[in-house]
Structures are given as C-alpha cells and as structure tokens.
C-alpha cells in the first residue's frame, strides 16, 4: 500500500478510485480506500499492520470530485498534566515548562469549499481522568508524559505539538506545582517544517475563587522561529479566560471505602 | 331579564346617533349581565391560557420542566376557577349556597380521595426536594429504572427490560430512593480472589496496572486495591475503579475480562472452592456391577 500523504504527515490525499493508501500517526494506523461514490476508512492500533480485508471498514458516501485530506487538531478535552518533579513556585515568580500534546487526526472531505470532518481520532489513546470534585467537574485526558523544563529536537514528532507554558504565581503564597489542567482546545498549531508548536499559554495564578487567568499567545512562540499555521483552535476563545487550573481532586485513599 | 335588556339596548341604539350612540351602545353592552359575562369569558380565557403558558416557561427557565408544568397547570386551574366564580356572580347566582354545597361536597370528596390527595401533596414535595429528575436512573423498593415522568399522582419508571413501573408519589416519599446517576462519576467495585500461594504484593501491582491500562477507567480519583480478607478458598481483594456514569457498563464488562487475561498471563491462579469427599469404609465394599447396579459384597 502507498503512503497517504507523500513526504509529509498532513495534507491532501491523492486517492484514485480502487486504490488503497495507509498512514501512521503515533499508535494510529489509518487505511483509506476509495470506491465509486464511497470512501472506506479503517483504523488499526496493533503494533504490526494486519490485513485490512480482515478488519472493519467504516464506509462514507462521498462526492466523486470531493478532496480528501488529513489534518491535525488539538485534543477535544482538557489535559491533566503532571510535572516531572514536584516543586513550589514562590510568590511573584514565574517558570516555563513544555508540554508534549499528542494530536488528533482528522480525515476531512472538502467539496465545493465545504469542509466536512469524517473522522476525528486520537493519534495516541489517552486515559480518562476527572478534574473537579466528586459531585461536579469534567472529564479530561490524562497525559502520561510529564511537563518538562527544557526541550530538545528528539521530543518532536509529527503527531505531537509542543506547548510552551508560562506559570506565573501572582499570589502572596508559594504555589505547589504537581498537576495542572490545560485547556488545549483553544490552542492553535504552528509548524516550522519539522517541529509542531502551539501558541504560548500563560497561566497567572492569583489564588482567586474564579480560578487562574489564562492568556493565549495566538502566534507562534519565540522558540519556533518563523512558522506557518497548521491548524486553527478547535474551539475559539477570547485571548483571556479564567479556569480552575491548579485545584484537583484529593486522593481517594483519604476517603475510605 | 336578558331579553329585556337586549330589547332596551336595541331601542337605545335605534334612538341614538353618531359617536354618542356608539358610546351608549358600549355602555349598554357592558351593563347587560349576560353580555358582561360573555366579555369576561371571551377576554378571560385567552388571558388565563397565555398567563399560565408564560408562567410555565418562566418557571421552567428558573427551575425544571417538571416544576414549570406544575406551576402552569396550577395557574391555569386557578384562573379558570376565578373566571367561573366571576361569571356566575355576574349572572346573578348567589355564591354562598354554592360555596356551602361545595364545602359539603369537598368533605365527601376529601374522604373519598384521601389517597389521591396524599399522592398529590407527596408529588409537590418530590418536585420541591428534587431527589431525582426526569432521565435519572433510580432504585426504589427493589425496582431500578429511568424516570420517565414525575406526575401529580405517581412517578413512572422505565426498567432495563423496557417495562413501565408506576409508583405512587406517597410510596416514593416513604421509601428509600437511590439516585444512581445523580453524580457524574461512579466507582465500580470488583471482587477478586486469588490462590493462597500467590504473592499478595504482585497481585496488587497487577490489578492496579490493569485498572490504569483501561482508557475508560479514570486516573483520578485513583483506582484502589484493598485486601478484603482470607476467604474460604482464596485471598480476596476489592478493586475500586472510578469511571464516568456513561462508561460504567463498558468498564464493568471490560475490566473483569482484562483481570482474567492479566492473571492468566502472569500465571496467577483464580481458585474455586475445592471439596474433598471421604468415603466411609462400609460404602467402599459396595461393588458396582457391569450394568451399573450395586451389589453388597
């Protein structure tokens, strides 16, 4: 089978009728086949490719002149990220960390300038977690890789977006940084050709009941250099918003059975 | 009386001229009791209908659709009662004997409909207290089902096997009700027994790994493994896994299979009760023939 997108992880797929193409992003293997009036899509998560004719196909009725493309997207829920080392951020201090975000893969059909997302799949299946209390909150993804204080080129992969995150403690007390929630649906994705970056996020902790103030850069971070927009935010938000970023559920063990 | 008033009205209308006659006509119209009653009914009905509808929408926005429905109905019936009393009054009926008769009738009806009234009042308590809302999964008196409606007399449930169960509101108020879907996350408890020869720490580690590998099991609140005790033929553990209420069944189905697979892979034995039979000496001398029949030696 030929690769889905020649030489690049994202872009338009050339898929003549009767042919099959395949592509891999993280643990996701996508197989696309075009028949007359239909697009067949199969996803595999096994370490080794298996015979697609033995697997389950999802079939979509598509226009014959519609263009198929593969595009990256930010995860559809917030991420709960832990830091590689638990530390305290003193009052009036700031720190910068980097979070590796596994991207989602969208299979898009474009016809007469109308984009339709046929499938929206995670490149890596993340575990669920809960952000909130026992009576209210929201489901988030649990990021198994910790936030880092520094990055190098080995950390960049085609299915990963690097998010520079500046934590600012504007409160009068020391802030323990163990885990935090990151609203990634509001982030844009940029690429300098080899590395994917999101806009810089600034989290200003004020010890306020309204939560922390989040500011989005809306442009490639300084680390990226010249970079092009690869994907717009999944959900548009204002440049500032207030969310609970550092609160988290207390350990279950203290609650007993 | 009404015919005479109309005749006078027409006569007045014939005699009058221009704008003055129209004004007199309107005065006459509203001065005739039957016509006045007609005006009250014609104007009052839409007003009562619209007001009750508006109240229903407003209360629904403020509280719940159920509370809105009840408030709208109450307003409608109250408005209708006011219209009826006003109309009867306009037509010259004395309300005192009517109210007296209604009182006697009310006492009789009260005795007859004691249960219904009790259910009605219980329904108001249920709506005010809101232990559950339409769509919740509840368990009451051994019945588990989704709440279809909370009506003035009863609550209707749809069970998993698609039966409709009607429970009187009074019973609901008196019974212990468990709302299974009130909170967004739930804990699934799985009981697991392993053989006495197994390493407890290793078993605990494998169980935690299985819980953490399941993408639908929440990482926080953390899954827990509790040593439950020494069973009849196994060491018993309880695995507590948190998940969202939507994924509860999927996790329940998946996690037990995953635990079995992980134990098989690690060579951990899940024991079953063993029974040793001791055959008394006398019975051992019973010879069994080729045709299956026994014969004492």
Image (cartoon, rainbow, N blue to C red):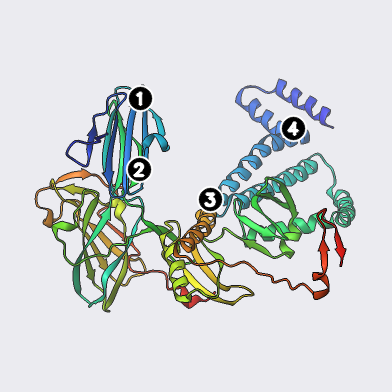
Say the numbered circle drawn on residue A35.
Answer: 1
Q: Which quarter of the rendered picture does the N terminus of chain A lie within?
A: top left
Q: CA distance from mark 3 to mark 4?
A: 39 Å
Q: Which residue is mark 2?
A: A120
Pointer 1 with pointer 2, Cβ within 8 A:
no
Residue B103 placement, left or right of A183? right
In space, the residues marked 4 and 1 are separated at their CA atoms by 76 Å
Tag of residue B35: 4
* Distance between mark 3 and mark 1 Cα atoms: 50 Å
Closer to the eye: label 3 or 1: 1
Q: Residue at x 82, y 70 (%)?
A: B283
Q: CA distance from mark 1 to mark 2?
A: 21 Å
- Marks 3 & 2 on one chain: no
Please report, as a chain letter, where disc 4 is located: B
Q: Residues within 10 Å of mark 2 (few under 14, many from 20)?
A: some
- The residue tagged 3 is B61
Q: Nearer the viewer, mark 3 or mark 2?
A: 2
Q: Which sits in the foreground, A203 or B111?
A: A203
Left or right, residue B51 beside residue B213: right
Percent coordinates x, y for residue A61 in the rendering = 39, 27
* Label of residue B36 in the image: none
Residue A177: x, y in percent?
A: 28, 72
Which is more toward the observer, B92 or A44?
A44
Q: The residue tagged with tag 2: helix, strand or loop?
A: strand
Between discs 3 and 4, the one toward the N terminus: 4
Q: Does label 1 lie on the same chain as label 3?
A: no
| Label 3: element kind | helix
Of labels 3 and 4, the one closer to you: 3
């Amino acid at each position: 089978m030929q690769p889905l997108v020649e030489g690049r992880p994202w872009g338009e797929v050339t898929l003549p009728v009767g042919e099959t193409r395949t592509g891999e992003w993280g643990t996701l293997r996508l197989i696309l086949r075009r028949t007359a009036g239909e697009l067949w899509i199969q996803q595999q998560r096994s370490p080794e490719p298996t015979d697609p004719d033995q697997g389950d196909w999802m079939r979509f009725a598509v226009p014959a002149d519609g263009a198929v493309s593969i595009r990256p997207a930010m995860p559809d829920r917030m991420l709960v990220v832990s830091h590689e080392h638990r530390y305290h951020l003193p009052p009036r201090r700031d720190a910068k960390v980097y979070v590796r975000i596994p991207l989602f893969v969208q299979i898009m059909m474009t016809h007469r300038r109308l984009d339709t997302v046929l499938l929206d799949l995670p490149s890596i299946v993340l575990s669920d977690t809960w952000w909130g209390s026992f009576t209210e909150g929201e489901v988030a993804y649990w990021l198994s890789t910790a936030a880092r204080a520094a990055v190098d080129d080995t950390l960049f992969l085609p299915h990963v977006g690097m998010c520079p995150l500046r934590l600012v403690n504007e409160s009068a007390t020391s802030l323990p940084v163990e885990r935090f929630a990151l609203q990634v649906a509001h982030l844009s994705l940029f690429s300098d050709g080899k590395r994917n970056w999101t806009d810089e996020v600034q989290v200003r902790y004020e010890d306020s009941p309204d939560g922390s103030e989040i500011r989005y850069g809306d442009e490639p971070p300084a680390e990226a250099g010249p970079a092009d927009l690869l994907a717009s935010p999944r959900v548009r938000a204002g440049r500032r918003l207030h969310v609970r970023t550092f609160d988290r559920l207390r350990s279950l063990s203290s609650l007993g059975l | 009386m009404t015919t005479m008033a109309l005749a006078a009205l027409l006569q007045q209308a014939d005699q009058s001229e221009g704008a003055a006659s129209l004004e007199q006509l309107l005065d006459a119209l509203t001065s005739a009791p039957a016509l006045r009653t007609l005006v009250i009914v014609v104007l009052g009905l839409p007003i009562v209908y619209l007001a009750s509808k508006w109240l229903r929408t407003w209360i629904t926005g403020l509280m719940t659709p159920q509370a809105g429905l009840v408030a709208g109905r109450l307003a409608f019936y109250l408005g209708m009662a006011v219209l009826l009393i006003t109309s009867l009054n306009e037509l010259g009926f004395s309300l005192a004997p009517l109210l007296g008769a209604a009182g006697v009738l009310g006492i009789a009806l009260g005795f007859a409909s004691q249960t219904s009234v009790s259910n009605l009042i219980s329904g108001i308590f249920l709506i005010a207290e809101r232990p559950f809302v339409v769509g919740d999964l509840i368990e009451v008196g051994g019945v588990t089902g989704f709440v279809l409606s909370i009506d003035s007399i009863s609550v209707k449930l749809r069970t998993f096997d698609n039966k409709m169960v009607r429970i009187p509101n009074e019973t609901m108020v008196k019974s212990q009700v468990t709302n299974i879907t009130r909170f967004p996350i739930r804990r699934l408890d799985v009981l697991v027994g392993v053989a006495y020869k197994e390493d407890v720490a290793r078993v605990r580690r494998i169980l935690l790994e299985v819980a953490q590998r399941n993408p639908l099991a929440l990482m926080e609140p953390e899954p827990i493994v509790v040593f439950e005790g020494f069973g009849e033929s196994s060491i018993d553990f309880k695995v507590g896994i948190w998940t969202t209420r939507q994924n509860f069944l999927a996790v329940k189905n998946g996690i037990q299979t995953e635990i079995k697979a992980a134990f098989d892979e690690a060579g951990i034995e899940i024991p079953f009760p063993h029974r040793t039979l001791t055959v008394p000496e006398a019975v051992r001398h019973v010879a069994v023939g080729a045709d299956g029949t026994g014969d004492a030696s």
